[in-house]
Image (spheres, rainbow, N blue to C red):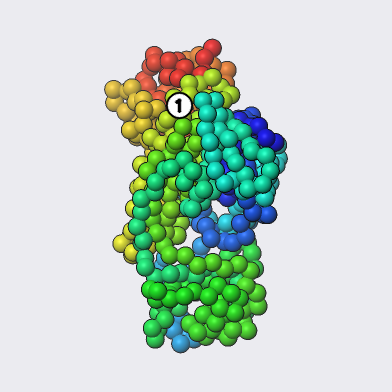
Amino acid sequence: MNHTDVLIVGAGPTGLALGVDLARHGISALVVEREDDLFPGSRGKGIQPRTMEVFDDLGVLGAIRAAGGGYPVGMLWQNGERMGEHRMFDQKAEPTEDSPYNEPWMVPQWRTQRILLERLGELGGKVAFRREVTGVTQGADGVTAHLASGEPLHARYLVAADGGRSVVRHSVEIGMTGEEVDPQPMLVADVRLTGLDRDNWHIFPPAEGQGLLAICPLAGTEDFQVVARFAEGAQVDVSPDGVRKVIAARTHLAADDVTDVRWASNFRPRAALADRFRAGRVFLAGDAAHVHSPAGGQGLNTSIQDAYNLGWKLGAVLGGGADEALLDTYEEERRPIAAQMLDLSTSVHRGETQRGGATRQLDLGYPYSSLTAETRMEPGPVRAGDRAPDGTVAGVRVFDAFRGPHWTLLALGTAAPAMPPSVRVVQGPAHRTYGTGLFLVRPDGYVGWAGDRPEGSGSYLGRFGLTG
């Protein structure tokens, strides 16, 4: 318990997803959490299509789909009367062969975490609760995490997934630059109530000096999520009575209609980005690296994709013979994406951008990464650095071929060269989505190398310890 390859601080969605990914790679990792249990609230409830693809690969998609549901249509209320529907998203995007998950899926954050924890256990991983990290020190060969009580923990690498007030980030003296997105404080709570249907996201516009209040049924549960905005400088009462009072004051419901307040919190929306994502053997991921407004549902999704990017790289270095310099590309690839998603979240919060399109995160990629190599004279519709779309090649579903911690070669309309045994090869004719060529797809589902001919593919794979 005191020695591990990777120590992950924080058992939120980021830490758990990273634990799952490392376990798939056979890497010894321990997740530590200062609390007695997982986070109990619904806060990050929106799972974007790109994250659904990640969950497909991590082996939890079935559980995620069973636990949640689609987003309901908004319904505006005034004086106890329904005033009409309010579309909160761009026009619905239907699933396609290359993007089978094309709409956000609602799962309360606490349930997403439970699913990831169960998957981690299936793979032999574990979470140590009541382990509060108070600081870290680094040496040439590892990191020591000091705890509020008990013996220190030692690891070759440490990943801070301990939230926006990250103790680890402060310990390694990485700054965070940001701004307040909205000076008005907000309440978010999970409640059970009577008097509202579960077919709509109920919106109560501001009236008589009171802020907006919205009540959303949480798919797969009996709960509703309440979000209320308050005037700048207001004190937000998060007690059960306080939550009941604000619902009764701003809706046609009575306080007694709220039968249970299961969790409540208050916050001021802000956007902030860590100055660096790495300090020696310590990496920042999730809210420890970037803090979003909840608008647009980008925070949890960007965080899980941090873990997905870092997991295979740690796996390649610790278990696959790749050079340690590969880990430098984590910050290179993820920090610009985080900055882009922060801008998007802030734009959605301020009403400048509608949910949909870019918020689905399907168009994100790494075209300018040092790991990206496009060698074709005339690249087709899918290029190196792009997300690798789904599809069917010679009767094989592409996402099925990708599933697992390995690299995949797609040989489309051209012969497949010899590959290392750990690279899965799928060969077929030119493809409607991909076009023609050779595509080496990374373990995180992005095209790393693309070429017309096999020359260069071997040396490219050698950068990741893949030979023979």
In this rendering, does residue 84 appear at all?
no
> Going 39% across and 70% down the picture, which residue do you hit?
184
Percent coordinates x, y for residue 273 in the rendering: 39, 48
Q: Residue furthest top?
A: 468
> Going 37% across and 43% down the picture, which residue do you hit?
275
Q: Amino acid at mark 1?
A: Leu
Percent coordinates x, y for residue 375 in the rendering: 33, 22
Please identify the quadrant where the N terminus is shown: top right
Residue 261 sits above or below residue 450 on the image: below
Percent coordinates x, y for residue 252 in the rendering: 52, 85
Q: Nearer the viewer, residue 399 or 298?
A: 298
Quadrant in the picture for residue 319: top right
> Going 56% across and 78% down the picture, which residue do you hit?
242
Q: Nearer the viewer, residue 45 or 449?
A: 45
Q: Left of 229 or right of it: where is 9? A: right
Q: Of helix, strand and loop, which one carries label 1?
A: helix
Q: Left of 137 or right of it: where is 412? A: left
> Going 60% across and 41% down the picture, which residue do you hit?
146
Q: Name the residue that disc number 1 marks.
A: 326
Quadrant in the picture for residue 42: bottom right
Quadrant in the picture for residue 88: bottom left
Please identify the quadrant where the C terminus is shown: top right
